[in-house]
Image: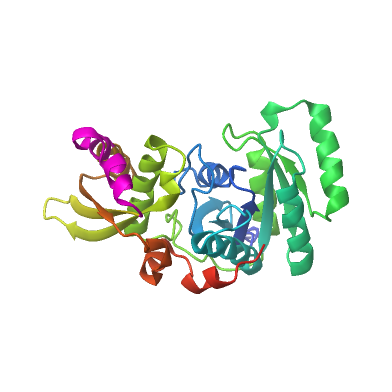
Amino acid sequence: MSEDIPAAPPTRAGFVALIGEPNAGKSTLLNQMVGAKVSIVTHKVQTTRARIRGIAMHGPAQIVFVDTPGIFRPRRRLDRSMVAAAWGGASDADLVLLLIEAHRGLTEGTQAILDQLMQLGQDRPVALVINKIDRVKSETLLALSKQMNEAYPFAQTFMISAEKGYGCPQLRDWLGRSLPESPWLYPEDQIADLPMRMIAAEITREKLTLRLHEEIPYQLTVETEGWEEKKDGSARVEQVVYVARQGHKGIVLGHGGETIKAVGQAARLELEAFMGRAVHLFLQVRVRENWQDEAERYDEMGLNFRDGDAGRT
């Protein structure tokens, strides 16, 4: 007599949007959840430009994280396109996670996000994620949680450290349970849906952002112009760094080309580790004064050029 075999749990899949102010830790949380570096992380704000999708498997659930640009008060076309991409990610998602920094509390910027969430309606659950909990005392966390839940009807509240992983398993469990029943949307071993050309460009832009001072990183972009698969299994990657001013070109190149050489070496090593094979990376720096007003540049970044005409605040 055969024993009844319990039915396997249904598969679940869906999109989880990460929203919040710049530097709230969205990219760090994405990388922590996926278990690999799929989104640019630096000490500077506004580093994520496109909506980057990272894919995490958790039991029968496939969680597709959408790391959106930080929501801030836009001033330029690029800013407006980034903010529009963030709200587009939230509108399209099955679940939304609002990240705030524990030590900053309910800021004016976060209040503006809550107001916008109210306008979007409550068609999808929104969970509050209080990040960087190791920076404050427990009584401060409890008071902040109470204040935030009085300001908006969150489905759940999680207290985490995205950098150290505290609280992330509990958040992952909830996400896996809360996504809709669905076949998986991507192959089981895929961790991102960005093309490698864009991932490579993001890696190089991160290295530039880490080396350069405050203003220039927001005045440059990186595009992968050429990608050649070599017979020995390596890849030849040609990239262009576009800057807005002639003076910026000299800064990016550095004395005797030392800055761009160091950036290229760091980017190549990380790209090789990511791809698991040899990479030959070649960088050029070009001046395009109005690159932030060229639709082609926005296409390369995964942003909508027309969203820059009328941003949402």
Q: Looking at the image, which residue is at 53% across and 52% down?
A: 57
Evaluate whether residue 202 shows in this view: yes
Residue 155 x/y as whole percent:
79, 55
Image quadrant occupied by the N terminus: bottom right
Q: Looking at the image, which residue is at 53% across and 46% down?
A: 27
Relative to residue 272, is residue 156 drawn left or right? right
Evaluate whether residue 122 shows in this view: no
Magenta-highlighted stretch: main secondary structure? helix
Residue 184 x/y as whole percent:
53, 65
Residue 297 x/y as whole percent:
37, 65
Is 121 within the magenta?
no
Front residue of 161 and 78: 78
Residue 164 x/y as whole percent:
58, 31
| Quadrant of the rendered image containing residue 158 | top right
Front residue of 11 and 52: 52
Is 258 within the magenta?
yes
Image quadrant occupied by the C terminus: bottom right
Range of residues picked out in magenta: 244-262
Relative to 36, residue 13 above or below: below
Front residue of 122 and 192: 122
Relative to residue 137, is residue 71 drawn left or right? left
Relative to residue 238, is residue 26 drawn left or right? right
Q: Looking at the image, which residue is at 50% across and 74% down?
A: 306
Front residue of 230 and 184: 230
